[in-house]
């Protein structure tokens, strides 16, 4: 059994063929423990296919009956973002392979984005060309997200891709879209907390705080203090998880 939705670029037969071909063909961009990302050429279309790992028994049932799958959420969130004027690779389809017990596999298909770099590279390299301006424009991009009510829960450095357009300006694109909330209004606290996963160095944090304060018409100190607090909380929590994981591995061995 299957469940799917696709854009006008594809028909059902083409979608099934793409999913089938992606098992053995295509260039692997990312192969992780949770998902695999491939790029595949299909009849002149360059596509990105994200396959999500087979969920455990409980999640198989949850994703079939109670909650939308990661693939479906990615597809639907991409459409909402584009409607709100936020760049993301064009959504083509989602596809779910179903069994009696629930979802077995799921896939999200989008246009391939030939981007130039991610915001992670800008944050990490203090000598990155035009670094401060890119950070300022990234802040403006994030502010726009917040203004249109988007709370991107995976707002980490690897999930904002940047393409330099023919005029030399920077276009920002969101990827990895399955964890996202939409609001009529984001509170100041929600806005500041949304920067926590970026794990910002202090110089980057100050650039972002300065620009966001201007855009949101609040003081630099208010933004910097709140944003720093959330970044530090997230970093400490992550460090604790890593230490706990290492201890568990040590005792197992």
Image: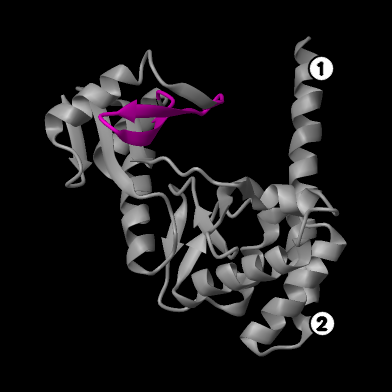
Question: From the image, which quarter does the N terminus lie in?
Answer: top left
Asked if residue 8 shows in the view, the reply is: yes
Q: Could you tell me residue 2's position as x and y percent?
A: 18, 28
Q: Along the line of sight, which residue is nearer the eye, 50 or 223? A: 50
Tell me the residue at 58%/65% (across/down).
169
Q: Is residue 41 magenta?
A: yes
For residue 177, above or below residue 40: below
Which residue does the numbered mark 1 point to in the structure image?
A: 250
Q: Quadrant of residue 218?
A: bottom right
Asked if residue 69 shows in the view, the reply is: no
Q: Quadrant of residue 57?
A: top left
Question: Element type at marker 1?
Answer: helix
Q: Is residue 181 magenta?
A: no
For residue 244, above or below residue 224: above
Tell whether 84 sits left or right of 28.
Answer: left
Q: Could you tell me residue 161's position as x and y percent?
A: 57, 50
Tell whether 35 sits left or right of 109.
Answer: right
Of marks 1 and 2, the one in the foreground? 2
Tell me the residue at 38%/27% (across/down).
40
For residue 66, above or below residue 166: above
Magenta-colored span: 30-54
For residue 74, above or below residue 136: above
Q: Along the line of sight, which residue is nearer the eye, 60 or 21? A: 21
**Distance CA(mark 1)–CA(mark 2):** 43 Å
Question: Element type at marker 2?
Answer: helix
Which residue does the numbered mark 2 point to in the structure image?
A: 221
Question: From the image, which quarter does the C terminus lie in?
Answer: top right
Tell me the residue at 80%/58% (across/down).
232
Tell me the residue at 46%/79% (across/down).
185
Q: Quadrant of residue 192?
A: bottom right
The crowd level at tag 1 (other Cα within 10 Å; few <14, some 14-19, many 20+) is few
């Amino acid at each position: 059994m299957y469940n799917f939705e696709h854009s006008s670029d594809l028909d059902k037969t083409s979608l099934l063929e793409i999913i089938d071909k992606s098992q053995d063909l295509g260039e692997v961009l990312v192969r992780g423990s949770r998902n695999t990302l491939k790029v595949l050429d299909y009849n002149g279309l360059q596509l990105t296919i994200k396959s999500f790992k087979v969920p455990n028994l409980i999640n198989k049932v949850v994703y079939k009956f109670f909650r939308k799958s990661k693939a479906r959420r990615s597809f639907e969130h991409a459409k909402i973002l584009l409607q709100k004027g936020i760049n993301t690779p064009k959504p083509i389809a989602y596809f779910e392979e179903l069994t009696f017990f629930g979802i077995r596999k799921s896939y999200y298909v989008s246009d391939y984005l030939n981007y130039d770099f991610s915001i992670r590279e800008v944050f990490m390299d203090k000598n990155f060309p035009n670094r401060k301006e890119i950070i300022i424009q990234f802040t403006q991009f994030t502010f726009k997200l917040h203004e249109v009510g988007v709370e991107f829960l995976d707002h980490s450095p690897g999930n904002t891709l940047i393409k330099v357009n023919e005029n030399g300006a920077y276009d920002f694109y969101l990827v990895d879209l399955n964890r996202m909330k939409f609001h009529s209004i984001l509170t100041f606290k929600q806005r500041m907390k949304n920067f926590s996963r970026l794990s910002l160095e202090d110089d980057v944090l100050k650039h972002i705080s300065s620009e966001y304060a201007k855009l949101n018409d609040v003081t630099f100190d208010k933004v910097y203090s709140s944003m720093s607090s959330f970044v530090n909380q997230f970093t400490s929590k992550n460090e604790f998880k890593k230490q706990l994981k290492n201890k568990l591995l040590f005792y197992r061995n």
